[in-house]
Amino acid sequence: MKVKRLVANFATTDPARAAVFYKEVLGLDLLMDHGWIQTYGSQASMTVQLSFASEGGSGTPVPELSIEVDDVDTALDRMKAAGFAIEYGPVDEPWGVRRFYVRDPFGKLVNILAHT
């Protein structure tokens, strides 16, 4: 048996609020929309990981979701332009990533990163 896919599910009374953050700013595709559930993703091949942490590194809280992008600074500019407050960073961490923290429309702490 092999795991074929991992899906993060976040409870909300208004799934459509995800569109600005995940589709418009981060560029994910709306893969499924049944009204009560909207699924965003990409057809790109990605590495699957689950992390369990006592902190987020550098003394930060553990983010609920990490999203690796190819250009952190562009993602940062898009987040700011869309009105999302940056909670940490941007910073070049000693373990080889550049990242920042931002909260999505549902209050989830999201780690946006790129390996340097």
Image (cartoon, rainbow, N blue to C red):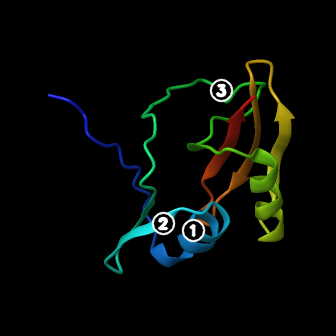
Determine whether label 1 and label 3 are within 8 Å by CB: no
Which residue occupies the extreme top position in the image?
95
Instruction: Give the quarter of the image for residue 81.
Output: bottom right
Which of disc 3 and disc 1 is earlier in sequence?
1
The crowd level at tag 1 (other Cα within 10 Å; few <14, some 14-19, many 20+) is some
Residue tagged by mark 1?
23
Q: Quadrant of the N terminus?
A: top left
Q: Residue 3: in sight, yes or no?
A: yes
The crowd level at tag 2 (other Cα within 10 Å; few <14, some 14-19, many 20+) is some
Determine whether label 2 and label 1 are within 8 Å by CB: yes
Secondary structure at badge 2 equals strand
Cα distance in 3D space between marks 2 and 1: 6 Å
Secondary structure at badge 3 equals loop
The crowd level at tag 3 (other Cα within 10 Å; few <14, some 14-19, many 20+) is few
Residue tagged by mark 3?
55
Which of disc 1 and disc 2 is earlier in sequence?
1
Residue tagged by mark 2?
29
Where does residue 88 sit, x and y in percent of width and height? 82, 43
